[in-house]
Amino acid sequence: MAQLASSAMQVLKSVIVSPKLSRAFQILGAAFVALEIFRATRVAGRYLLPRSSAGHLKAKYAKAGSWAVVTGASDGIGRALALELAAIGFNVCVIARTQSKLDEVVGEITTKNPTVQAKALSFDFGTTSNEAYADLFAQLDALEIAVLVNNVGISHTNAELFEDPSVADDLKLLTVNCEPMIRLCKYIVPKLKAKRSGAIVNLSSLSAVVTAVPYLATYAGTKAFNQTFSTSLAYELQPFGVDVLTVTPGMVSTGMTQGSAARRPRVNFGMVDSAVMARDTLAQLGRVISTAGHHNHDLQTSIVSSLPLWYVGPSTYKLFKKISDARKRKAAAASVAQQNE
Ligand SMILES: NC(=O)c1ccc[n+]([C@@H]2O[C@H](COP(=O)([O-])OP(=O)(O)OC[C@H]3O[C@@H](n4cnc5c(N)ncnc54)[C@H](OP(=O)(O)O)[C@@H]3O)[C@@H](O)[C@H]2O)c1
C-alpha cells in the first residue's frame, strides 16, 4: 500500500514539474483570469454607466412601420412596455383578454402621448385554434408593424411540486407561454425580413438562466423554450437587419409576483419596478441580443450563472419547499379554524 502511494506521488510530481504541462496550466490560468476580468468589467460597465436611451428606435425601424404590438399588455410588464414604446413615439396595439383593462391602457397611452395612435385587441392566447389566429392576423394586417413584443405569459398559482397541478393546468401554461411566440413570429418574420428592418422582443425569465427551478418545473421549462427559441431566431434574422432581443428578468413587481396578497409587493433590489424594467429593456434593443432588462437583474444573472448547478438546484429546491410547506400549513390551519366556527 505504502509502495503504491509512493509511486502515485512520483507520477504526480513528474506531471507537476513537467515544463510543458506547467506552461499549459499557466496559459489556462491566465485565460481564465482574463475571461473573469472581461465578464466583471462588462457587468460593472452595464451597472455603473448611465443607461442609454431608446429614443432612436422609432427612426431605426421606420422602414418596417410605425406600429408596435405587445401581447399580455393589459397589465404588468406588457403594459409597462406598451407605455414605454408609446413614449418613444410608436403607435401601439395592445393584446390581452380583458377589454376594460385594455381600454384603460389605450386611454393612458393617448392621454400621455397625443400624437400616438393606440388600439386594443381582445384575444385569449389559451387557444390553439388556427381560425382564431387567422382572425387575429387579419386585424393585424391593417397595421405596419415595426416591433413585436411577445410578452404574454402565465405562471403556476403557487410554487408546487410537478405532480400537484393537473395536466390540463400544465398544458395551458405550455400553450400560453410558447404557442403565441411561435405563431406571432411565423406571422411577422417574413414581413420584417422583406423590409430588412424591425424588431422582436421575447420575454423569457431568469428561471431559464438558472436552468433548474424545482417547484416551478413546467413554468421554467416554457421559459427555457422562450430563451433558446429567441436567441436562435436572433442569429437567423441578424443578416436581414431584424433585431431580436431575449429578456430574462428576475422578479418584477407585477400581478404574477404579488402572490395571494391583495397589494403589489414592495419594490426592492431584487423585486424591480416594471416601468424602470421596461425602459431599461428597450434601451438595449438593437444593441445586444439578450438582457435581464433591469440592471439589478443583470448583476443577479451574472452571479447566478457563475454558480454550479449542483449548488443552485438543491438550494432552490430547499427554498421553494420551505415556501410551499409554510403555505400548506397556513391553509390547513385556516381550514381547521373555519370548521370550528
Ligand atoms: N413578473 C415577473 O417577475 C417576471 C419575471 C420573469 C419573467 N416574466 C415574464 O414576463 C411576462 C409578463 O409577466 P407579468 O409579470 O407582467 O404578468 P402579469 O402581470 O400576470 O400580466 C400578464 C398579462 O398577460 C395577459 N394574459 C394572461 N393570460 C392571457 C391569455 N390567456 N390570453 C391573453 N392574455 C393573457 C394578462 O391580461 P388578461 O388577464 O387581461 O388577459 C396580462 O395583461 C411573462 O412572460 C412572464 O413569464 C415575469
Image (tube, rainbow, N blue to C red):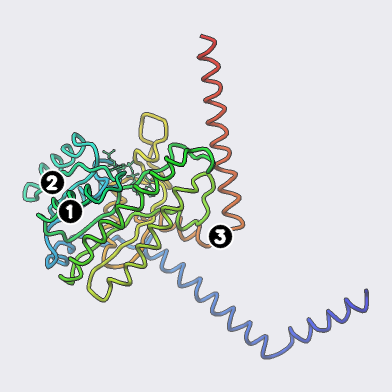
The x and y percentages for residue 303 are 50, 59
Q: Point out the tag, 3 or 2, that comes first from the N-terminus.
A: 2
Q: Residues within 10 Å of mark 1 (few under 14, many from 20)?
A: some
Label 1: state its secondary structure: helix
| Residue found at x 39% / y 56% | 248
Residue 197 lies in what quarter of the image? bottom left
Mark 3 vs mark 1: in front = 1
Q: Distance between the residues labelled 1 and 2?
A: 14 Å
Q: Is residue 328 left or right of residue 16?
A: left
Q: Mark 1 points at which residue?
A: 137
Label 3: state its secondary structure: loop
Amino acid type indicated by mark 1:
Phe
Q: Is residue 52 left or right of residue 144?
A: right
Q: Residues within 10 Å of mark 3 (few under 14, many from 20)?
A: few
The x and y percentages for residue 251 are 41, 46
| Residue found at x 19% / y 65% | 198
- Position above or below: 327 against 19: above
Are dots 3 and 1 in contact, CB under 8 Å?
A: no
Q: Mark 3 points at which residue?
A: 307
Amino acid type indicated by mark 3:
Leu
Q: How far apart are marks 3 and 2 (CA)?
A: 44 Å
Q: In this view, does 165 lie to the left or right of 180?
A: right
Q: Point out the tag, 1 or 2, that comes first from the N-terminus.
A: 2
